Amino acid sequence: GQNIDQPTEMTATEGAIVQINCTYQTSGFNGLFWYQQHAGEAPTFLSYNVLDGLEEKGRFSSFLSRSKGYSYLLLKELQMKDSASYLCAFMDSNYQLIWGAGTKLIIKP
Amino acid sequence: EADIYQTPRYLVIGTGKKITLECSQTMGHDKMYWYQQDPGMELHLIHYSYGVNSTEKGDLSSESTVSRIRTEHFPLTLESARPSHTSQYLCASSSPKPVEETQYFGPGTRLLVL
């Protein structure tokens, strides 16, 4: 079957670094997405990984290990506006997105 | 980024009423999606479309129907609303940029069925 898992909630301090993990199981894989969703708003695209390794985009980086079914989102120099839920989703063999429940990130001053 | 519009943004309605949630996009995307999301929970795919005259059911059809007569318009209809339909409904369309199947979401409709 297919499943995807990420922590429910994390807390970090403004200016620090936080890593949000995501593990998945699937027989068909066409890449993994990370989205940011502020409370009461729609998700917005952050990153996409289809090959193993680290993709860096400003303060945000995303890593993928296909053999381990594992990805993480790394947020550096945390700002209060980074308080949001972070959703990981993988694209299955039918090019459908399978979504995790999201990790609520709380940033404290 | 895609421009996706949803109306209404908020709706309170009584049980048994028929409602249509509107979704329009102006980017000419072929693929469109409807999701249901409860607070703090994952997105559940209700319906999707590959293009005009194409509609498919997702994992959670939730007694709803969709139509795709025009590329830009993908309305969702609940024939008889129930309290269990109370949720947020998100419409999305997908673009091949920056990567294939990147989904762009509308602002959502928050539905409360009394």
Image (cartoon, grey):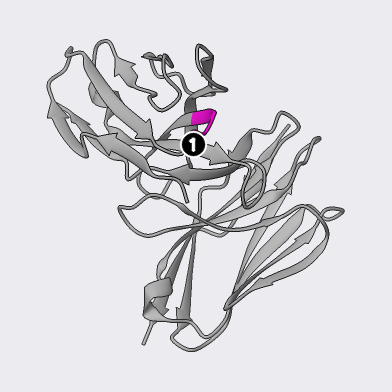
- Please provide percent x and percent y for residue B17: 17, 14
* Residue B7 falls left or right of residue A12: left
Q: Which residue is drawn at 56% across and 47% down?
A: A100
Q: Residue at x 61, y 39 (%)?
A: A98
Q: In this view, does B98 lie above or below B92?
A: below
Image quadrant holding the N terminus of chain A, namely top right
- Please provide percent x and percent y for residue A90: 67, 45
Q: Is residue B57 above or below residue A85?
A: above
Q: Is the magenta stretch mostly helix, strand or loop?
A: loop
Q: Is residue B88 magenta?
A: no
| Residue on which the image places disc 1 | B93
Q: In which quarter of the image is residue B54?
A: top right
Check the residue under mark 1 and report the chain it is in: B
**Between A108 and A83, which is closer to the camera in this rendering?**
A83
- Please provide percent x and percent y for residue A33: 63, 52
* Residue A61 falls left or right of residue B90: right
Q: What element carries label 1?
A: strand
Q: Residue at x 41, y 78 (%)?
A: A107
* Residue B15 falls left or right of residue B58: left
Q: Quadrant of residue A6?
A: bottom right
| Residue farthest along the right direction in this orientation | A67
**Between A108 and B74, which is closer to the camera in this rendering?**
B74
Image quadrant holding the C terminus of chain A, namely bottom left
Q: Which residue is drawn at 43% across and 16% down?
A: B68
**Between B16 and A80, which is closer to the camera in this rendering?**
A80
- Please provide percent x and percent y for residue B109: 27, 37
Q: Give the range drawn in magenta.
A: B28-32
* Residue B101 falls left or right of residue A9: right
User: The residue under label 1 is which amino acid type?
Assistant: Ser
